[in-house]
Image (cartoon, rainbow, N blue to C red):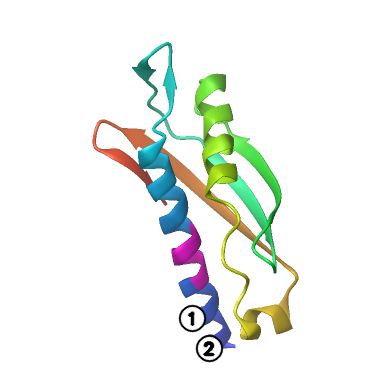
Amino acid sequence: ASTMKAVDARYVEQVVAKIERIGKQFFPRDAGRKLYGKPRVAIAIYSDGSIRDIKILQSSGNLVLDAKTKDIVSRAAPFAPFPKEVRKERDVLELIRTFSYTGRGVSSF
């Protein structure tokens, strides 16, 4: 079980790194101005790396930023297929992340 968790964690790190990279490339803007905030998002990924669903769990308070966050996640897909060890355990992996858009860039936790 602990090995599975380590494999899951590595996969999640790769997914998150790709989303953050795309977020930096397509930093959310509205009318030419950067948008800042912290939407909390649930991302469900199928074992082939495609996205099943993206939901805003907690709004940033800015509906445009929330929509652009979903767009960034969509742009980052598809992700790598799950490692064999993970596919044996599950068909869908759900991540819950808070994306933070600040003057320093994009990060998540």
Label placed on residue 103: none
Up the image or down, 1 lies above or below 96; here it is below
For image coordinates 43% across by 28% down, the residue present is 28
> Outermost residue toward the top?
31
- Position in image of residue 31 (x %, y %): 42, 11
Up the image or down, 73 lies above or below 78; here it is above
Residue range corresponding to the magenta coloring: 11-15
Residue 99 lies within the magenta run: no
Total count of labels: 2
State which quarter of the image contains the N terminus.
Answer: bottom right
> Outermost residue toward the left?
104
Question: Is disc 2 in contact with disc 1, using a CB cutoff of under 8 Å?
Answer: yes
For image coordinates 31% across by 33% down, the residue present is 102
Return the residue at label 1: 6
- Position in image of residue 76 (x %, y %): 53, 49
- The three-letter amino acid code for the residue at tag 2 is Thr
Label placed on residue 3: 2
For image coordinates 62% across by 51% down, the residue present is 43
- Position in image of residue 89 (x %, y %): 71, 80
Q: Residues within 10 Å of mark 2 (few under 14, many from 20)?
A: few
Residue situated in front as seen by the camera: 31 or 54:
31
In terms of image quadrants, where is residue 37? top left
Up the image or down, 27 lies above or below 19; here it is above
- Secondary structure at badge 2 equals helix
- The three-letter amino acid code for the residue at tag 1 is Ala
- Position in image of residue 75 (x %, y %): 55, 43
- Secondary structure at badge 1 equals helix
Distance between the alpha carbons at the discs numbered 2 and 1: 5 Å
